[in-house]
Image (tube, helix red, strand yellow):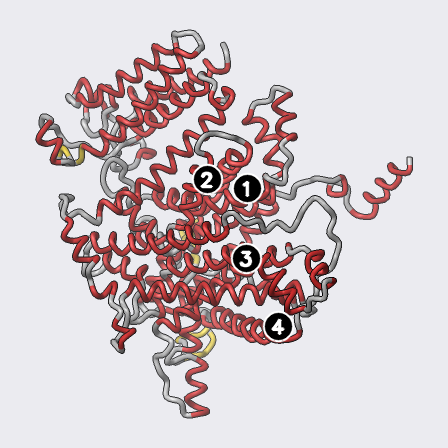
Amino acid sequence: MTPQNRRLDIILAAAVLSFVLLPWYRVEGGFFAFEWLTGYYGDADLAPGIVQVFGFDRIWLAVPMLLLLSSLSARLMPLGEARGRLLVWCGAVGVAYLAVEGLSIGYMGWNWSVLERLMPEVDGQLAMGGGAIVLGIAFVLIFSMGLAERGVMKGDAFIVSSISMLVFLVAIFVFYPIGSMFVGAFQDFDGSFQPDGFINNMQDPSIWSLDCLIGGARCGVAWRTLFLAIMTAAGSTLLGLAFALVATRTRFPFKKGLRLLTILPIITPPFVVGLALTLLLGRSGVVTQMMADVFGVEPGRWLYGLTGIWIAQVLSFTPISFLVLIGVVEGVSPSMEEASQTLRAGRWRTFLKVSLPLMKPGLANAFLIGFIESMADFGNPLVLGGSHGVLSTEIFFAVVGAQNDPSRAAVLAMILLCFTLSAFLIQRLWLSGRNYATVTGKGDSGAHIALPKGLSIAVHAVVIPWAVFTLVVYAMILFGGFVKIWGLDNSLTLEHYIRAFSISFRDGGIAWTGVAWNSFWTTMEIALIAAPLTAAVGLLTAYIIVRQKFAGRGLFEFALMMSFAIPGTVIGISYIMAFNLPPLEMTGTALILITCFVFRNMPVGVRGGVAAMTQLDQSLDEASLTLRSSSFRTIRKVILPLLRPAITAALVYSFVRAITSISAVIFLVSAEYNMATSYIVGLVENGEYGIAIAYSSALIVVMVTIIGGFQLLVGERKLRRENRIGGKAGRAKINQEQTA
């Protein structure tokens, strides 16, 4: 039996079993509870596809059955163009039909009025279950096998299947939710077409008002959010550049400490910085009370508004800008700067005309990241915004507040998405067609020139106070968990940690009696499942982008990276609108949280994998393929061992973001699956600051520990013998071998 036939047999067997044995519709108690095994052939809600067709007269499911039979008949044909063409048609029509059928028939019958008029009346149906989902995946793989047999991608079934599955998954979990959100803006509560809600919301003065420019009270929420995002992006980019210049172009003695500061905000829940600022600068904060006692300054509410949000966001996002910019600043070629000085240009002119222009890609990326992160930020505006709401908080209250207006939430999310995608496209247009390469194959051993004296003084004057301020803020975060009532009773106590994480022993076992344990274990479970899936999908995508050439590769890469430009708030509201009803119903389950994390964080794994893979010569995997190794074995044995730094980065980032994300998670959690960030937000809203800070501090410690575990588990890539033979003994052995 040929490998092609063996793979096709496995796919067809899975498809037949899904249609004959697995429940076609979603099981309320959960598929893996296996309660459906008891008498499910006689229950219309639990029966497999074949019973739905012949036992319950759901004739519309006969079409996928016929397509499956056609695929089975193709197996009897010899390998070649004809069989490949038939498989392609069966797979493509099968996927398309399942999508249309699932969207057109809902709980009560036809979803679209045009079908109600043209088609006979049908019974309603539940969301797709295990049988329908497995058959849909099988149709995608049948389509891929047909393309491979027709010679696409040199007949490599693994590569064709990988591309097809990635396109299929991105379409379902990125573009389908966004499309559902756009449709939801034009729907009424019963799902009927109603454009009045969209028109009224788009004309709402509270969104677009510019009264602040003519002396009015305030601008609309859209302009407020845009202004805040621009200010945050500018502030975090300038501060990140100042930090990068101090760390690379000066003799600052605490450079390692600066790099350590960049880790803290990344592993900190996003609203904790805002909470620490409240404890420090709020009406009852340490600094506020000190100013009142010493100077008689009346405590004010200046922190609660755009000013406080801006300070918190710049604190949170400056380290990310620093991480983006430090590599760019170090990558500026010293030889170019030396050439400028040789032509009698001074330090200022060299920096402004040579060094700074070469940093444009990094500056543009840092600004874009700051802009998108500010737009998507939910925690800090919730804590510090007061009456000055931004788009992310307004979307939240439109869904869960007294308004209960999904159409308004969809319109606000569309505006937010337009802002971020516009920034994303402007950045790409600004950088397109320009070459900023400074590192070539030639040696470049020169030293970077020193900063102009005035600039050096300026960056030190900015960086040192800001670093001290950051340390004070994080000291407040830690200290706040050990006082009884912040600002009222500052006596030390462990009460908050005991309430959050108390443990007792009952009936010979451990009882997790602390109030935080439930959300803690749920968060760890979901994050540890999502992290490896995110890394796997991201690195596989990177391999396809870098190593494979196919039609639409540029569009494929852009579509994947565009999901990075979609704010988490938009992702959350779009997932609610897409997966709350058939054909795919996942709200209230762990699955919706996992898929959200995977496809929200996947672009970082893609970019890291692309950057690492471009450093690997293609001759390495070509040699493996020449020795008749499959693409899958080449990836596993050759590529992955050399991508360990990228694997670690993808695992760490996806794990940390799964724990610290709030903007999307706040819409998707349920009573059974409540994530840590959502739980802490509830504590903050109830005024239980001590427990919130204690929980956040514990999360930071856990994240640092698990990050270290990821690094030990993945290990380092070994390119030289020195990595295998360590210490003086190893070097002595190598010297002896070289002498011999």
Q: Is residue 693 visible?
A: no
Q: Is residue 677 visible?
A: yes
In primary-sequence order, the first of circles 4 and 1 is: 4
Above or below 505: residue 225: below
Q: Is residue 192 left or right of residue 616?
A: left
- Badge 2 crowding class, 10 Å Cα cut-off, few under 14, some 14 to 19, many 20 or more, is some
Distance Cα–Cα, label 3 vs label 1? 23 Å
What residue would you read off at disc 4? 455
What residue would you read off at disc 1? 609
In primary-sequence order, the first of circles 4 and 3 is: 3
Q: Secondary structure at mark 3?
A: helix
**Tag 4: residue type?**
Leu
Above or below 682: residue 76: above
What residue would you read off at disc 2? 557
Distance Cα–Cα, label 4 vs label 3? 18 Å
Distance Cα–Cα, label 4 vs label 1? 36 Å
What residue would you read off at disc 3? 360
